[in-house]
């Protein structure tokens, strides 16, 4: 819950923080940008640390960092200190997901997809309900309340994790020292620098494009690839993308899925309020058709994947996205509330199925020893998808979200859904072919 909750609650707190610290909106928006940048880098890094030093310890350490930020942020005397607390919050909440995914892979052998569906339900619910929850908290206790609210969840999670998670395999001091000395700090540094600069380049599309950041990002990614191919124990063994092409396809599909979803998640509220003249309350209710159905279908998708595998659900989710995007393009503008609810429910079906089964597919295709790292990269794909969606919406909407522009967004979603469906068909055929080859 913690990472998606904190990434979405902050939206309604920006105005209050801007007023308290007497800042411009562009400056205070760094609370959002810094969280996204830090999470995109921290997810695979903390996943790698968990792979080496233990998943339970990493999970609990992440909770401690979130607790520190929840206590420290409300008492920040300067905006810079608040940004630092926000970064601590991001790193801590980022450590939780890959460690939790690795614990599920390691210790839950039966009905694994159903277990992942539980994670998906809470994550989807927090993304959808985060702004609403944040609004109530701000009315109740001002912007510091969005940080205080983390503490009861952190305390409960820490106690449950401490007592119920299986213990990490204990390593002697010499082993820990050797693992630490072999940790690929240069690779992590190149990856972090490349990701930050590249994301900064993507985020700059809304104003003036920072081409130097894009070039710098590509340069650091090239250094990262050179380093990982050379070092004995790499941070991310990039050879897995060649030896495990299905894993690469899972990442690509997850990026496409999140571009599709976040185009709606970010674009629809603006359209409802600007073009349709609806208030925040009615806009939120309409959005619940998509997020609510997504939450409900997640449990069904988990059971479906447990019984039949991931290939059928992946194709079904992608096909539903095409149907939903076509219906959205031709029937959404000018439709009644009931029709809008039906269309958004179809979108919710597509996202709920894809979100769960792609997590299952990622676990299935990942080498067991680096599941924390690959899970972290999986979440990085989510952030890439959300950032690409903001770029698309910024380029299309410009100053306002008009009906004609929403149809253009629908056309782009048709393209995204078609590409995703074709990849899912190729993915299933390749997986079956490789599976038959292994059996032979």
Image (tube, grey):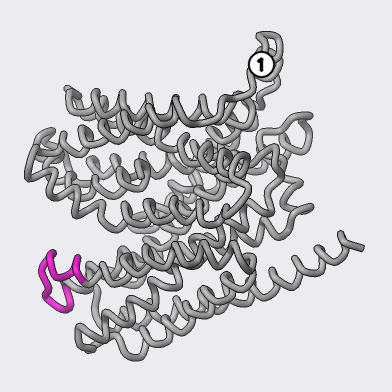
Question: Residue 425 versus residue 38: which sits nearer the camera?
Answer: 425
Q: Quadrant of residue 111?
A: bottom right
**Residue 236 is inside the magenta segment:** no
Q: Residue at x 53, y 36 (%)?
A: 99
Is residue 220 among what the camera can see? no
Q: Position of residue 375 (x, y in %)?
A: 57, 45
Q: Residue at x 67, y 11 (%)?
A: 172
Specify the quadrant that holds the N terminus: top left
Q: Quadrant of residue 428?
A: bottom right
Horizontal arrangement in the rendering, residue 109 relative to residue 129 (left or right): right
Q: Position of residue 145 (x, y in %)?
A: 16, 36
**Residue receiving disc 1:** 171
* Image: magenta residue range: 274-285
Question: Residue 6 versus residue 395: which sits nearer the camera?
Answer: 6
Identify whether 88 is placed above or below 209.
above
Is residue 362 among what the camera can see? yes
Q: Residue at x 18, y 28 (%)?
A: 74
């Amino acid at each position: 819950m913690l990472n998606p909750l904190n990434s979405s609650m902050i939206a309604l707190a920006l105005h209050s923080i801007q007023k308290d610290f007497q800042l411009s909106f562009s400056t205070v928006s760094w609370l959002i940008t810094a969280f996204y940048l830090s999470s995109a880098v921290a997810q695979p890094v903390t996943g790698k640390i968990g792979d080496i030093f233990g998943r339970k310890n990493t999970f609990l350490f992440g909770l401690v960092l979130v607790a520190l930020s929840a206590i420290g942020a409300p008492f920040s005397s300067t905006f810079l200190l608040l940004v630092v607390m926000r970064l601590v919050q991001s790193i801590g909440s980022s450590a939780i997901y890959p460690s939790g995914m690795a614990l599920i892979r390691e210790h839950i052998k039966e009905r694994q997809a159903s277990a992942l569906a539980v994670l998906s339900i809470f994550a989807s619910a927090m993304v959808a309900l985060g702004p609403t929850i944040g609004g109530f908290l701000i009315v109740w206790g001002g912007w510091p309340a969005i940080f205080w609210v983390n503490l009861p969840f952190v305390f409960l999670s820490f106690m449950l994790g401490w007592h119920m998670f299986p213990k990490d395999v204990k390593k002697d001091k010499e082993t820990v020292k050797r693992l630490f000395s072999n940790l690929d700090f240069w690779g992590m540094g190149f990856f972090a620098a490349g990701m930050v600069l590249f994301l900064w380049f993507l985020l700059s599309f809304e104003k003036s494009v920072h081409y130097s950041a894009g070039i710098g990002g590509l340069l650091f990614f090239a250094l990262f690839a050179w380093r990982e191919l050379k070092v004995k124990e790499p941070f991310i063994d990039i050879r897995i993308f060649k030896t495990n092409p299905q894993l690469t396809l899972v990442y690509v599909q997850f990026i496409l899925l999140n571009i599709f979803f976040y185009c709606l998640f970010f674009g629809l509220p603006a359209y409802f309020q600007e073009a349709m003249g609806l208030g925040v309350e009615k806009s939120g209710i309409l959005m619940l058709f998509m997020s609510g159905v997504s939450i409900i279908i997640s449990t069904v998708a988990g059971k479906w994947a447990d019984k039949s595998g991931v290939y059928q659900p992946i194709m079904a989710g992608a096909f539903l996205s095409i149907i939903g995007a076509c219906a959205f393009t031709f029937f959404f503008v000018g439709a009644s509330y009931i029709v809008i609810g039906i269309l958004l429910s179809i979108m919710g079906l597509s996202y709920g199925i894809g979100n769960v089964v792609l997590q299952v597919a990622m676990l299935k295709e990942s080498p067991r020893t680096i599941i924390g790292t690959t899970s972290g990269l999986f979440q990085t794909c989510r952030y890439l998808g959300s950032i690409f969606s903001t770029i698309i919406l910024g380029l299309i909407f410009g100053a306002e979200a008009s009906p004609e522009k929403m149809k253009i967004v629908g056309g782009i979603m048709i393209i995204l859904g078609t590409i995703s469906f074709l990849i899912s068909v190729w993915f299933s055929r390749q997986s079956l072919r490789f599976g038959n080859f292994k059996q032979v």
